[in-house]
Image: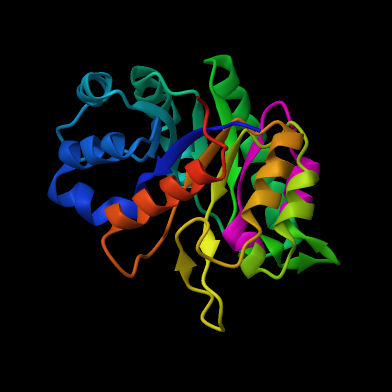
Amino acid sequence: MRFHIALQTWTIREQLNEDYFGSFTKVAEIGYEAAEVGMPPEGVSSADMKKHFDRIGLHALSCHANLEQLTNSLEELIDFVKGLGSRYIVLSYYRFGSREEVMEIARQLNQIGQSCLDHGIRFLYHNHDWEFLRFDGEYALDLLLEATDPKLVGVELDVYWVKKAGVDPVAYLRKLDRRCPLLHVKDMEPGEEQWFAEVGEGILPMEEIIAAASEVGTEWLIVEQDSCRRSPFDCIATSYDNLQKMGVLQP
């Protein structure tokens, strides 16, 4: 039960705005193997990023994008990801308003997934809590997964948002056999606010989640903390250290 560990860079978004390359250096120094990135600031190319990542020993695992980028700029996005040496493109955010909309988006995602696959890239869907709204008694996320081809559309499950929706993240993850190569490990503080916590410092059953991830073929655990009560670099260091203590890091 060993995994590669990456960081979703939304956690350090403000630091990236202040010092883009220096922030990635700090991520590597903590011990992270890879980063899940978004499109870089103007004037920074995939070649620039790859050169810096190679120098600091960091890998660009995946790239988040919104549906507009995926539909209007997919070729450019694929070229960017290939330039980084990344393997995944992830739809980061979408809200469904109806069952019919789920079906229409599923059709689009199959097409996007096929284009990605044609270039050797795997396409994934990243959830929040609103995918667990029900349409005709079924979760929107279940409908989406039923309507998409597993070879074309995988899942990057975020366990915090599953829990926030009132669903058991361990049980839901077990439904995603061979379809969830990347897993967002994100913890939750106790209490009504359900605020974000460092991995291993909250109420989510992380060891059970990680055991389930091993069962379903997950390869990477991606740390993310949407908002931090202290320095984000301190938070991601705590999350990394706690994962290390759990004995789940690849040697």
Q: Residue furthest bottom?
A: 192
Q: Is residue 40 visible?
A: no
Q: Quadrant of residue 24?
A: top left
Question: How many numbered markers are drawn?
Answer: 0
* Camera-side residue of 94 and 250: 250
Percent across and percent down for residue 184 are 54, 47
* Camera-side residue of 238 and 8: 238
Residue at image location 54% in from the left, 40% down from the top = 221
Percent across and percent down for residue 163 are 65, 65
Residue at image location 69% in from the left, 40% down from the top = 213
Q: Is residue 244 visible?
A: yes
Image position of 163 with respect to 9: above or below: below
| Residue extent of the magenta highlight | 141-162
* Camera-side residue of 170 and 66: 170
Percent across and percent down for residue 56 are 24, 25
Q: Is residue 246 left or right of residue 177?
A: left
Percent across and percent down for residue 211 are 71, 43
> Is residue 98 a member of the stretch shown in magenta?
no
> Is residue 156 a member of the stretch shown in magenta?
yes
Q: Is residue 57 left or right of residue 18?
A: right
Image position of 109 with respect to 233: above or below: above
Q: Is residue 176 left or right of residue 10?
A: right
Residue at image location 48% in from the left, 50% down from the top = 242
